[in-house]
Image (cartoon, rainbow, N blue to C red):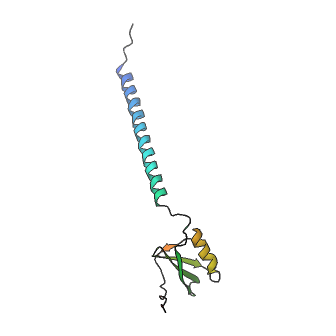
Amino acid sequence: MTKNPSAAGVFCFRIRWLSLSLLKISFMKMKVALGLFLVIIFSTSATPNQGDNIEFVCLKTHKATNTCHFNFIVDGAKYRHVDMGCKFGKKKDELIKKVKEGSAALARDWKIDCPEAKEK
């Protein structure tokens, strides 16, 4: 005697097969998306060691808000470090060392401009 599957059994089998195949496709898409995300993150992340291309330009103290603005030039681009509470106000060499190591946060562009140094 041969088994003749009922219509309900065939329907349930097809639903299970369809849901499993969709899970496989979505899992593959998720793996590809995660891989692309990681590639983008690793390719755009900053290098931890800035090197010798950092030039300290000036320090401006804003007494009303108790902040010190350190301006730097890195590879020709203007960067700033804003020190809340002016902790590095008297220890600017320590901050410059931290910037060269890559452990101090720098923001793009200067918020407070410094006067350009006059060449002799």
Q: Position of residue 29 (x, y in %)?
A: 41, 44
Foreground pick, 87 / 24: 87
Residue 72 position (above or below residue 12)? below
Foreground pick, 67 / 79: 79
Q: Position of residue 14 (x, y in %)?
A: 37, 28
Quarter occupied by residue 23: top left
Foreground pick, 14 / 62: 62
- Farthest residue toward the left? 7
Q: Position of residue 71 (x, y in %)?
A: 52, 80
Taking the spot 39% from the left edge, 22% from the top edge, the residue there is 9
Residue 111 position (above or below residue 49)? below
Q: Position of residue 98 (x, y in %)?
A: 61, 72
Foreground pick, 108 / 65: 108
- Farthest residue toward the front? 120
- Farthest residue toward the top? 1
Taking the spot 46% from the left edge, 53% from the top edge, the residue there is 39
Quadrant where the N terminus sits is top left
Taking the spot 40% from the left edge, 39% from the top edge, the residue there is 25
Relative horizontal placement of residue 11, taking residue 37 as reference (left or right): left
| Total numbered labels | 0
Residue 7 position (above or below residue 119)? above
